[in-house]
């Protein structure tokens, strides 16, 4: 394993705040300071470094985008008081308001931190981004264990959304959920709407949501009045969602082909026309530049689907996203 010449390698760093319900491990490695056990709420700032390959960077640019994750390292995770993290976020978010992101299953702190950094870059959420990390185990075999930990985390997630909204005097609070994390977002919004019927949040983006489509359709009327808009991103060939459908016996919200008219209050964005950006077809939120561009228009410019570039209307609340080359 050849050592790279430090003179030829530069490291770009990104920083963003996090909330986590994970246990501390006392590990000296920054990416391993938290484990997969349930614990009390902690907060801090995560620093991710991206190795710049210098002379090799033209090669990095033609490599599949999902390999980029391998060039990232968690360099530091600095714990801070949750109130101090929220006060800092209030300053950096400014007039736009915060954007809260909840990750999916099979994500330990290290992988979660790297992927959260990639999403922040892809959707251009600098200054607004807060990553919420529930105690997922980081093991593919622990799906039902992760489901239980997600449900356990929902009350804290609801509290966090309410507190973000309370502190955000300028912009509205946007909420983003991926995979199993999107299910957590929906359940937390259900609780938020019940506790605070008057609350008004911003845009909600559910990416590859691993949730029973029909359960979502039933909950939707309860949460829809509390948010500016709800967008669901779906794809054909999403392998983890196909597996989840087999396990649960019911179609997943993030699979293409569901009857969009049953969730008429939602804007459904079908990504099946895009080239697959990862072997699983489940990680387009971090690896697809076309999805990043669509998220930027939704979350930073507040544009609804009918006004966004690159979308082709297929039904009243269903659009197909075209690849960046076609935009």
Image (spheres, helix red, strand yellow):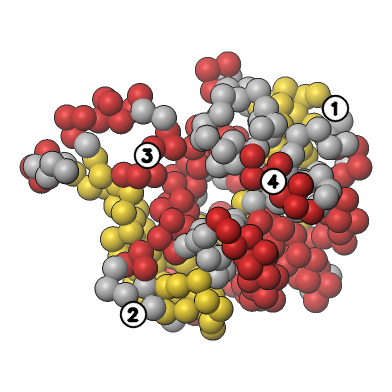
| Of the pair 254 and 265, the residue shown nearer to us | 254
Disc nearer the start of the sequence (1/3): 3
Q: Residues within 10 Å of mark 3 (few under 14, many from 20)?
A: some
Q: CA distance from mark 2 to mark 1?
A: 53 Å
Disc nearer the start of the sequence (3/2): 2
Q: Is residue 85 visible?
A: no
| Of the pair 303 and 186, the residue shown nearer to us | 186
Q: CA distance from mark 4 to mark 2?
A: 35 Å
Q: CA distance from mark 4 to mark 1?
A: 28 Å
| Residue 144 image point, x, y percent | 67, 64
Q: Is residue 218 visible?
A: yes
Report which residue position mark 1 lands on: 315
Secondary structure beneath label 2 = loop
Residue 104 horizontal side relative to residue 30, left or right:
right
Q: Quadrant of residue 171?
A: bottom right
Report which residue position mark 3 lands on: 68
Closer to the camera: disc 3 or disc 4?
4
Taking the spot 88% from the left edge, 51% from the top edge, the residue there is 214
Mark number displayed over residue 243: 4
Q: Are marks 3 and 4 in contact (CB under 8 Å)?
A: no
Report which residue position mark 2 lands on: 26
Taking the spot 31% from the left edge, 54% from the top edge, the residue there is 73
Q: Are marks 3 and 2 in contact (CB under 8 Å)?
A: no
Q: Quadrant of residue 276?
A: top right
Disc nearer the start of the sequence (4/2): 2
Closer to the camera: disc 2 or disc 1?
2
Q: CA distance from mark 3 to mark 2?
A: 28 Å
Q: CA distance from mark 1 to mark 3?
A: 35 Å
Q: Residues within 10 Å of mark 4 (few under 14, many from 20)?
A: few
Please identify the quadrant where the C terminus is shown: top right
């Amino acid at each position: 394993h050849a050592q790279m010449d430090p003179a030829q390698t530069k490291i770009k760093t990104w920083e963003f705040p996090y909330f986590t319900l994970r246990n501390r491990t006392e590990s000296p490695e920054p990416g391993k300071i938290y484990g997969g056990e349930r614990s009390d709420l902690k907060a801090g700032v995560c620093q991710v470094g991206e190795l710049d390959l210098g002379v090799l960077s033209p090669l990095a640019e033609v490599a599949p985008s999902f390999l980029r994750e391998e060039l990232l390292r968690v360099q530091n995770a600095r714990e801070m008081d949750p109130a101090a993290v929220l006060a800092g976020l209030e300053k950096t978010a400014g007039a736009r308001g915060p954007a809260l992101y909840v990750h999916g299953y099979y994500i330990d702190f290290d992988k979660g931190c790297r992927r959260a950094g990639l999403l922040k870059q892809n959707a251009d959420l600098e200054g607004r981004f807060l990553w919420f990390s529930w105690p997922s185990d980081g093991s593919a075999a622990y799906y039902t264990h992760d489901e239980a930990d997600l449900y356990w985390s929902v009350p804290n997630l609801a509290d966090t959304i309410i507190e973000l909204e309370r502190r955000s005097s300028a912009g509205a609070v946007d909420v983003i959920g991926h995979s199993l994390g999107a299910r957590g977002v929906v359940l937390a919004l259900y609780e938020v709407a019940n506790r605070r019927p008057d609350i008004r949040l911003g845009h909600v983006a559910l990416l590859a949501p691993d949730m029973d489509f029909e359960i979502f359709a039933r909950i939707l009327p309860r949460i829809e009045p509390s948010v500016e808009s709800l967008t669901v991103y779906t794809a054909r060939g999403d392998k983890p969602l196909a597996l989840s459908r087999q396990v649960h016996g019911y179609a997943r919200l993030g699979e293409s082909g569901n009857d969009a008219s049953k969730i008429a209050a939602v804007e459904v964005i079908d990504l099946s026309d895009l080239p697959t950006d990862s072997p699983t077809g489940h990680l387009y939120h971090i690896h697809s530049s076309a999805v990043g561009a669509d998220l930027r228009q939704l979350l930073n410019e507040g544009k609804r689907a009918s006004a966004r570039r690159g979308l082709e209307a297929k039904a009243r609340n269903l659009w197909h996203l075209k690849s960046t080359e076609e935009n």
